Amino acid sequence: MDVQLNPEESSLLRFTTAGSVDDGKSTLIGRLLYDCKSIFEDQLAAVEESSKRRGDEHVNLALLTDGLRAEREQGITIDVAYRYFATPKRKFIIADTPGHVQYTRNMVTGASTADLAIILIDARQGVVEQTRRHAFLAGLLRIQQVVLAVNKMDLVDYDQKVFDSICADFMRFAADLENPVAIMPIPMSALNGDNVVDASEKMSWYSGPTLLEHLETVKVHLGEAHVESRYPVQWVIRPMSDEHHDYRGYAGRVASGSFKVGDEVIAYPAGLTSKITGIHTFNGDCEETEPALSYSIELADEIDISRGDLLAKPENPPHVTQNLDAMICWFSEKKMKTRGRYYLRHTTREVRAVVQEVVYKVDITTLDKVAEQTEFSMNDIGCIRLRLATPIFCDAYSVNRITGSFVLVDEQTNNTVAAGMIVRTLDGADDPDAAGAYAI
Amino acid sequence: MSLTHLQYLESEAIYVLRETAAQFQKPALLFSGGKDSIVMAWLARKAFYPARIPFPLLHVDTGHNFPEAMTYRDEFVKEIRANLVVGLVQKSIDEGRVVEEKGPNASRNKLQTVTLLDTIEENEFDACLGGGRRDEEKARAKERFFSHRDSFGQWDPKNQRPELWNIFNGRKHFGEHFRVFPLSNWTEMDVWQYIRQEKIPLPSLYFSHQRKVINRHGQLLDTETGFVNLLEEEKAKIQEMTIRFRTVGDVTCTGAVLSEAATLDDIVAEVAAARQTERGTRADDRRSETAMEDRKKEGYF
């Protein structure tokens, strides 16, 4: 059953859940979907049927998300599964990912589009290595909201002391994360439904929101409209019709900030300035853009602008760079080696790139930085230095998730082999980031 | 201002449609006359406005169509000023490329795959936009926006390219192609709310009407078009009922639901109260537990 959202007011929240079956992750997602009435009769019947055939003791809700034959056969999630549910207030997209080390790349993928991460902790186990890794990844991908779901409270007698001590433990190392995160700890029992959708009667000492209340009300995308304005051009619209004879619109989706009719803009890489004369959509013209919406923008002057170019404002320009340091997560079975050459895809632009050096690798168990490395294997995370054949127009990932991110593509197989987050650019004295360039 | 969920989904779909036009030489939009492909074509019109959609619509025609869907198709294509390419399953049968199924459950649904792949090859299409959504079916929950197909049109679910942020990798070797799904993140409810918001015209089949149907294994199948092979004992059991279709495809595998929903508001309310997924009315998905994954691996939509 799909809840009827109010289409005028409902917003959208994308969140990720990383964890293993042992943490009760599938139970939690199943509980959210079930209690929000997002599981249909035929889906439930199909899952009940398969559970019975497999000899599972309970209805195995993981079978709802583990749809691929290999996953069902092996009883594991091997990919990111996207699930959808809605309440009258919000539509939710869950990126459900497996939690073990060998699926780090899947967690990174799921986290890249998430506004919030749910980190599951088994109340009996407390903060374990996996918890730290999940928190590290959430910070690395700049997910600003984290829910610390302390699950299986029923197995520790709903004891407040256990909960408080786990929270204190988690807060201690969360202070050192790559990017700051807001943390909301919630004690729950996904199995019994305590504090998932309905408030628990067994934990009167907890006065905070239930998980769903928090998901429905948490504020995300704060300040997006107020940061630097960036508009990557996807496509040039030229109708060549009698009616729109001279129309030349730059089609794109606003990456950040806003543009108004009359604004002065700089087009990169041309470096030329012009004024916005029109902001168009099918539904009519606008005076001003909203972040994340798609438009067609017209300029006063005929400048040579095409796909891969960027419109920005002169008062806060992007970094124009051919040398940069970036945190990457390696996705491929084929190892990354120093001097390796790849295509780098950044917003709508593609350039060739060569790996200059490995700055450091992160030991994914201890989270320590390890120097003097030359290659990356699948699931490795670390900082590398890249040189590009032609410039890109970018920002640090810490300030802009769209213009600060890229992927690397293998030149032979065309596969996407790495996710990258720009840490700093390394060109010229006029670049404000260059000063600290070699500091690690 | 924060975006409404429909604004977000619309902008995301437009972004994907523009990426498709930009990254491929010769894309096509798979148009069945069903509501998802109608919404996708509508979004394509918005994405490139005031220019025309820079790629054709492609209809893989099983020949077993509802006449209402055909009339609608031709009018809609005219209204949005799109080009239409039709691939005929009948042609594949005549040429001996496929053999028609026999028996009461005979359907041309599976045969479409060959016609589709042949049409892709003949026209040298390198990307096909489809209206598939991840909420439809469990194998689709792991589908990418840009889904790579090898030179045999096959999908390898274990070896999919990761998709991060809004970066889509459409690089390919000669002979390979892509399926692109701009509506990946939409649910059935989102589609209906969007149709209502945009006032998109739909085939009359989606709205409540009287129809002579038979009940076969819990599915209400049409008997008026003559495409469903009826068993002798079924002929006596034809009943006129008040129904509508939740999905519109090949007549032989599209089941109707009992419904009084005559307006978009009625349908939105009905979808909100539904206890079965819309694919619960599709005979093609019921053939086995991983029927969809198996068909997709072969190159199905």
Image (spheres, rainbow, N blue to C red):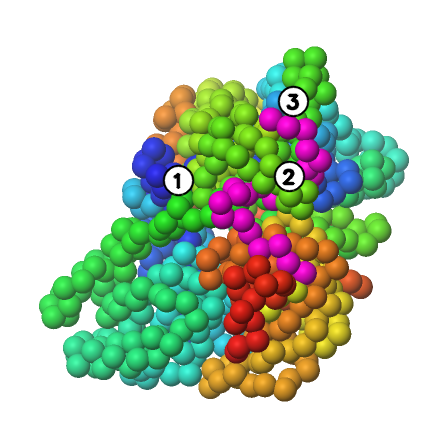
Is residue B195 found inside the magenta-colored segment of the image? no
What's under tag 1, amino acid-wise? Leu
Is residue A311 found inside the magenta-colored segment of the image? yes
Q: Quick check: A265 left or right of A412?
A: left
Q: Which chain does the residue under circle 2 lie in?
A: A
Q: Secondary structure at mark 3?
A: loop
At which x and y percent is residue A335?
70, 76
Residue that lies at the very extreme toward the front in this rendered image? A429
Nearer to the camera, A328 or A111: A328
Tell if the residue under mark 1 belongs to the same chain as the one under mark 3: no
Magenta region: which residues?
A300-322
Q: Secondary structure at mark 1?
A: loop
The residue beneath circle 2 is A272
Q: Which chain does the residue under circle 1 lie in?
A: B
| Count of all numbered marks drawn on residues in the image | 3
The residue beneath circle 1 is B3
Q: Main secondary structure of the magenta part?
A: loop
Cα distance, mark 1 to mark 3?
28 Å
Residue plotted at (64% across, 47% down): A348
Closest to the camera, between mark 2 and mark 1, is 2
Residue A293 visible in the snapshot: yes
CB within 8 Å, label 2 to label 3: no
Picture quarter with the N terminus of chain B:
top left
